[in-house]
Image (cartoon, grey):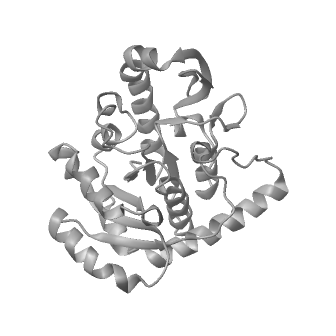
Amino acid sequence: MTAKTLMIQGTASGAGKTTLVTALCRIFSDEGYKVAPFKSQNMSAYSYVGNGFEISRAQAIQAMAARTEVMPIMNPILLKPLGNYKSEIFVNGISHGKMYARDYYKKFVLSTGLVESKNALDQLIKTNDIVILEGAGSPSEINLQRYDIANMRMAEYCKSPVILVTDIDKGGSFASLIGTLSLLDKQHQKLVKGFVINKFRGDIAILYPSYSILKKKTMKPVIGTIPLIEFDIPEEDSLYANPKQVSWTKRYLKTLDKEINHLALTVKKNLDMKKIRGMLN
């Protein structure tokens, strides 16, 4: 078995990568595919503790959305911030020690971090029908691109098509899309197959002229406009000072499953799933 891959990247943190991957995991699971999420590197103070391992809470929830076992290879590198630019590093769910940011970038990320990420992704690709990859932050953070193992390096490694998502509720989304794309290397620009406009309020017809301009400037289509959705799924803790605490009880998991279904249904209605299926390689 060799999985098809699709990667969701964003113009910034909070653009909607995590929720979009969660929704797609459930959508493809509903269609009968064996699906797995993957994020090579995640920084999060809130984790999921499994049987002898610890990974990002976001990837655990995505695995639940995919109706598959939560596995450490779904988030091979977890950084739990400790303050003062220092984090505890988990590799495939096991603590690898504590490291300052400068040491992480110079001594770890492009050696152990990259190797373990590729190995983990290889395992998921061999055992699933579809792997949905999630990027981190933005792929065009030019000060960090050299050390970035969470975005285009992974997409290029598995030759994955990329969907770029942006948060229109914050404003500046079209500039963010064009700017993000323009700062990528040419070979990485080619991997981006389309855009998703997230968290939209109002009449979508207002956006259509902008979509035409965006297509002319980038030669890439908008493949969905997702409305601002109310749902009760824990967000990434980097976005909020007091993120929601989670207790993994049967009652909570049942509630979470309903919320995932609600999210997936709304996303599916507002994405061109035919185009997305056509992207899967």
Residue 198 x, y percent position in the rendering? 45, 66
Using the rendered image of the protein, determine whether residue 191 is visible from the camera's viewpoint. no
Residue 56 x, y percent position in the rendering? 60, 39
Using the rendered image of the protein, determine whether residue 232 is visible from the camera's viewpoint. yes
Q: Which residue is drawn at 55% across and 31% down?
A: 78
Q: Is residue 47 left or right of residue 137?
A: right
Residue 280 x, y percent position in the rendering? 33, 60
Q: Residue at x 20, y 50 (%)?
A: 182
Q: Residue at x 22, y 65 (%)?
A: 220
Q: Is residue 189 left or right of residue 67?
A: left
User: Number of labelled discs?
Assistant: 0
Q: Which of 9 and 265 is in front in this view?
A: 9
Give the residue furthest to the front.
171
Residue 258 vertical placement versus 102 (above, below): below
Residue 73 vertical placement versus 205 (above, below): above
Q: Residue at x 56, y 63 (%)?
A: 26
